[in-house]
Amino acid sequence: MQRYFTDILCPEDKRFTVSGDDARHMIRVMRMKAGDSFIAVFKDQTAYRSVITGVNDTEVEALAEEKLDRTPELPIHVTIAQGLPKGDKLELVIQKATELGFSRMIPFKADRSIVKWDDKKGQKKTDRWQKIAREAAEQSHRTVVPDIATPVSFHDLVGTFSDYDAVITAYEEQAKSGEKSNFSSVLSRLPEGSQLLVIVGPEGGLSEKEIDILEQNQAVSCGFGPRILRTETAPLYALAAISYHYELMR
């Protein structure tokens, strides 16, 4: 069943209106009409099976009929900090990480980032990233659309560490040395509802200077298995491992 996010709270009479891009998609792409059902996710993250009661050229009138109690969200809130990669790799990461349940993306300018961020054109790109996250959240039946931040400096990223219960970073030297337990140890001490920041470098990884700064600020360097992962693979590996730990082992 098609899923759409709304920016309103479910009203007391359960009647609401869908407009804008979502209405155009429902009317022109999905060819939906009165009597058809869909899932509406409201601002407070509640989801309702809803039925269309009326359609015009620009709006869809609907009635929220049945509240859906099952939550598809990860038991902990995972933020991915990704060193700016080349090309459209970040778009892939945002799409797939949304499907895997992450909460937020913070791109950052790393020492080895080849891409040079243009602040003047940046908002347009950030808006595109947010749209990708929204579409992926609808497809994967999320109740939350991940927040995609405007890229920050490495220094500013480190300054956010106090917002998290734990910070880990993927470090290829740890993988090469056979380190296996740091990631698992962090997860084992984080209860449900915790905030976790996962830092991944760009192509070429994080510099030794950056790793030193991260570790000085209590970030835990981890090997993500015995193989060296690409920048776009590492965050997806982390999210899959987190899902297994919190959702399949319990």
Image: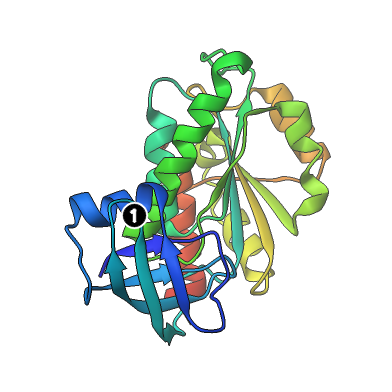
Which residue position is annotated with label 1? 23
124 sits left or right of 186 in the view:
left
Q: Is residue 39 above or below residue 215?
A: below
The relative height of residue 176 versus residue 32 in the rendered view (above or below) is: above
Alpha-carbon neighbours of circle 1 within 10 Å: few (<14), some, or many (≥20)?
many
Q: Secondary structure at mark 1?
A: helix
The residue shown at (78%, 28%) is 155
Residue 181 found in image quarter? bottom right
Residue 147: where, in percent of width, then height? 57, 48
Foreground of the two, 184 or 191: 191
* Residue at left offset 56%, top offset 72%: 75
Q: Position of residue 4 (x, y in %)?
A: 38, 61
Would residue 226 be visible to someone looking at this image? no
Spot occupied by residue 65 in the image (x, y as percentages of width and height): 38, 85
Q: Amino acid at mark 1?
A: Ala
Q: Is residue 76 visible?
A: yes
Left or right, 239 with respect to 217, comes to: left
Residue 153, position in %: x, y? 71, 25
Q: Residue at (47%, 23%) from the top-left corner?
A: 203
Q: How many marks?
A: 1
Drawn side of residue 142 relative to residue 161, left or right:
left
Residue in front for this viewpoint, 50 or 138: 50
Quadrant where the N terminus lies? bottom left
Which residue is the extreme one toward the left?
Answer: 31
Render colour scheme:
rainbow
Residues 126 and 7: in front is 7
The outermost residue toward the front is 56
Q: Residue at 49% across / 47% down in the picture?
A: 224
